[in-house]
Amino acid sequence: MTILRTEYPRPDFKREQWTNLNGEWEFDYDDNGIGSKEKWYQDHSFSQRIHVPFSYQSALSGIGDTTFHDLVWYRRKLSLQKNSDSTYILHFGAVDYESRVWVNGELAGYHEGGHTPFSYDVTSLLHSGENQIVVQAFDASTALDQPRGKQYWKEESEGIFYTRTTGIWQTVWLETLSKSYLANVSFTPDIDQKQINIDYSIASGNPEQVLEVTISFKGQTISKDSIQAINNHGSRSYSIDHHALQLEDWLWSPEHPNLFDVTFQLLEDKTVLDKVESYFGMRKISVHNGEVHLNNKPYYMRLVLDQGYFPDGILTAPSEDDLIGDIKYTKELGFNGARKHQKVEDPLYYYWADRLGLLVWGEMANSYVFTDRAVERISKEWQEVIARDYNHPCIVAWVPINESWGIRDVVQNAKQRSHSLTMYHLTKSLDQTRLVMSNDGWEHTTSDLCTIHDYEASKGVLENRYQAVENALAFLPSGKPIYAPGHSYQDEPILVTEFGGISFKQSDWDGWGYSHATTENEFLTGYRAVLDAMHNSPLVKGFCYTQLTDVEQEINGLLTYDRKPKAELKKIKEITQVGKG
């Protein structure tokens, strides 16, 4: 079996030495829940094989079974020559939803949350020779109080809901490190002060160690510094005012995705204990006088809704090139950004959005009912999302809740309004550098933008609705008020963050959309009508068109599910960009 997904999975924190554990694993369903009692983590005769990191529901897994199997097990053998001076860290990009990991029959750890990474120090559990890694994953197919996004709780997809993903769906890898190593780094840009603030932590550091930080720009070293690894509060600020750099040359934007490369070396007695390659972008997103500003200048956001599903991989892209392809198509269609909808995307997508230049709104996969357990789950996992993706300059907005999913009674229920407010302020407490929406689409509590979802197809109706603030705020999308009780419009920029959704059938495959076209000309005419309404509005400061690609039975993409354009790219681009810079 050919191993897919061989690229380094964490490109903003890259080490040269690592072991990719993707590929063929042994696999079994545990529909009767007997695996733990029978100690499958110690010994079991597995009956199937699966290609990690693809879920068993996907074709690329080699199984392609979309029926319910909530409890599954994996096993893989690993041979190594253990070094007594090394630390071994086992990494998982994402496992949906709960997981337990055993190494050589001993429990390495437990993780809850289907979209975020986790790691275990397995040094004491490994030995020289053959080792065994076993993973148990539990994903309750019908649990509506766990964050699940568009994963349907019925076996057959329908409407806006799609095939589920159970178990491992992002890369698994092993890193061999020194006893002391760089544990994590975060970058906070401040373009007004021309500074980058770097926070870091070192595992098992000591006063004899120094952290060497080298910052370069387009191959030119602009800063090199050695910091005592202990007693330094784990933070350092660097000025980005090198004589060779002009302000306009080094700010990050979709049009000029400038990035600074950073090399970290942890040294002790001139011996390199750890080396990590990273990068950062200098950019600022803010709101001034009812306008969205990028790098202190008004900026019109032209986003496309991107759900990140793939025909053969479901939530897992078949290859890095597929992620790159979606970004390139987004730009070729005339958009300067994407709203990743109800999915915490693969880190490689954000890496390439950083490199190629694309604004991204990061969005949590929501649950569907409101319970104390649901609040606990989304709050915990959302913090992990922000921590994982904090360093990506492409991400300019956070959306913890969409369309009142998980807070269906927010208008009548003060507890749910408090949850919406909490998610806004929790996000702001962790990240002051990005815009935050409390509840994208309608029933906002506190949000940095007033975002509205509007699938009206008539150009005239849209132009009238977004001619004046009072018209827009009087609109009831899906019968919902724009603001929840106790909250009101405070002159935030107004963006229409879901609209369009024109279906254009390309095959015998039946599907649906919010409005319909039967020919390419009808499709382009309908697209121009809704886009012109956005462009002609004196009120709207940006938009997000639904959507980039078809997804399963939903055929309102600009591209088909297998990424074929439904009209000439240049024609779509001209309509997308007309009238706006």
Image (cartoon, rainbow, N blue to C red):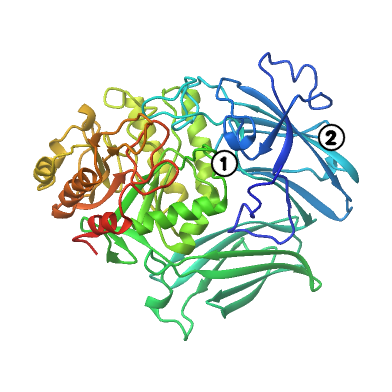
At mark 2, the secondary structure is loop
Amino acid under disc 1:
Thr
Q: Quadrant of residue 201?
A: bottom right
Left or right, 543 with respect to 146, comes to left
- Which of these two is toward me, 541 or 293? 541
Task: Give the image location of residue 391, x and y in percent.
Answer: 51, 57
Amino acid under disc 2:
Asn
Task: Give the image location of residue 204, x and y in percent.
Answer: 75, 55
Quadrant location, the N terminus: top right
Can I make out residue 407 in this image?
Answer: yes
Can I make out residue 483 in this image?
Answer: no
Q: Quadrant of residue 65?
A: top right
- Which of these two is toward me, 483 or 394? 394
Residue in the image at 31% along x and 30% along y = 512
Q: Quadrant of residue 45?
A: top right
From the image, tell me which residue sits under label 2. 104
Within 10 Å of disc 1 (Cα), the crowding (few <14, some 14-19, many 20+) is many
Quadrant location, the C terminus: bottom left
Residue in the image at 21% along x and 47% along y = 521
Position of 409 relative to 95 (above/below): above
